[in-house]
Amino acid sequence: MAAATATLSPPSVTPPTYHRIVSPTLTIPADPLQPIPVGLLACQRDPLLRELATTAVSCRVSQSPAPPSNGREGKKKKVAPTPTAPLLEVILHDTIIFPEGGGQPSDVGILTSSDGEQWDVVEAKRHGGHAVHYVRLKPEQNVDDALRLFAPGAVVGVSLGEQGYKRRLDHACMHTSQHLLSAVLETRLNVETLAWSLTAAPAPCYVELARGLSPEEIAYVQEEANRLVFEGRSVHIEVEELDPSVKVMSGPSVGIPSDYTGGVKRTVVIDGIDRNPCCGTHLPSIHNLQLFLLPNTEALARSTSSSVRLYFLAGPRLITHLTSTHTLLTNAASIMSCGAPQVPERVQQVVDERKKATKRVEDLEAELAAVLADEFVNAPPREGGELVLHRHRTDDSANPLTFLSAISTAFVNKVAEKGSGVSYLVVLTSSPSAQTSTSTTVVLVIGSDDKKVKAAGDELKAKLNVKGGGKGPRWSGKFIGVWKDGREGATVASILGSLTF
């Protein structure tokens, strides 16, 4: 017997009751040379439709190398990319490719001209009340041919393609789930949704709320939302003529933009749960849209207000999240040689043991630093009594400068204990055991005379290209490359030999 596979798939056909025109005077334009306005597009009338035959209304070469942002920019202004191929702006009588709006990103898809040639739609935008398809030409495609094939009245096939339909399904799942989540938050907890973001897959989407939620509240909202999901509440669209005096709608959507000229007001209705103006694509049912809320919120602080983000997953993103999370947990369990339920406990044991090992290493390094410092103090001085020396170490410590600093501290303390007022200049260097052209050797200079320390540092910069600096009796830097005692070590010895006290 074949194994059963659980899937979260939408109905294969949109019910005829999904799209409802409630204004008696509102009709869908039938003239093939007139574009159907955004709000009445085929993608909005039937979100499960994969392909459509229509006609071209206009086609022109875009003046921009990339589709415009509709006046919206992120926190960091994007630099326009260098044009790689011509970009066309195509307006069709009807389309199943959704133009960006309502917080929902654009669809992508394919246009097929009358000669069978396929043209890639990389994005669709709303201009006024019309959907504009941005077609990026392939290297073998010609602009003149495109303008001829998409001339007014030309027959055009529109399809989402496999990847485009997966994108549509993901967006519809997340957008409909957001409406459900916001409705439950408002009706059950009286928490209004201030904004939301349909992030790029497979990342969780989020709703922005005026206050944080406790773990108990998050669990309650998730339970209530999924109770409605299991009931299989239906979703339908009500379309009416737009009152020109009404421009801003309440709710988490962006409302009706001031530049919208399509003359249509579109309301998404989840049966018995929510009514919300929105232009996005929504599934005809919330059945199978099981909702998962990440059990914490992310606080945001702004100059004028504060809010939190509640992240959620549904549909294909939820399956992707569960699959990747299970894979990570299984791999961690294998590494830890334990069952998945024991991973947190075993990880805690490893962390505790690591802390103990780190403490033990620190204690041993302190003891070793004291021994080395004692060796340096008892090293033979110069004829004038100055203690000038260089000591190099091969050390694979995660932070070799910390150990060199411990040695220098112990050395200075031992010099002070002797109380003889000895002048000293010490250069300590540390390299990893396996060196390459990108390896880092740490350099530390300490001395009783600030000027001599600075002079030694300047010479190290000039002769060994050591990058660093310091102040007073201490100077530190880094040497990049392979350190050899007979070469770099000899240069350090030469530098120290040239300094007089």
Image: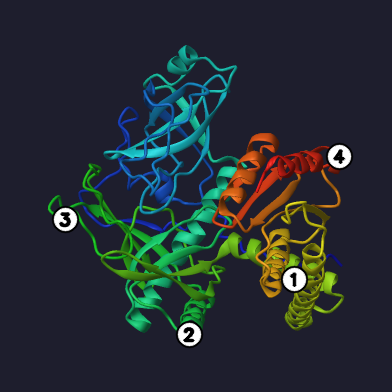
Return the x and y of residue 50 as percentages of the image width and height. Answer: 54, 44
Q: Which of 42 and 459 lies nearest the eye of the viewer?
A: 459
How far is mark 4 from mark 1, CA to CA?
50 Å
Lower position in the chain sequence, tag 4 or tag 1: 1
Return the x and y of residue 102 as percentages of the image width and height. Answer: 36, 53
The amino acid pointed to by label 1 is Leu
Lower position in the chain sequence, tag 1 or tag 2: 2
Lower position in the chain sequence, tag 3 or tag 4: 3
Q: Residue at x 54, y 56 (%)?
A: 472
How far is mark 3 from mark 4, CA to CA?
82 Å
Q: Nearer the viewer, mark 1 or mark 3?
A: 1
Q: Which of 348 and 153 lies nearest the eye of the viewer?
A: 348
Q: Nearer the viewer, mark 3 or mark 4?
A: 4
One can see residue 6 in this view: no
Q: Which mark is residue 329?
A: 1
How far is mark 4 from mark 2, CA to CA?
71 Å
Q: Which mark is residue 233?
A: none
Q: Which mark is residue 486?
A: 4
Q: In screen coordinates, is 114 left or right of 324? A: left
The amino acid pointed to by label 3 is Val
Classify mark 2: helix, strand or loop.
helix
Lower position in the chain sequence, tag 4 or tag 2: 2
User: What residue is pinned by disc 2?
Assistant: 220
Lower position in the chain sequence, tag 1 or tag 3: 3
User: What residue is pinned by disc 3?
Assistant: 246
Classify mark 4: helix, strand or loop.
helix
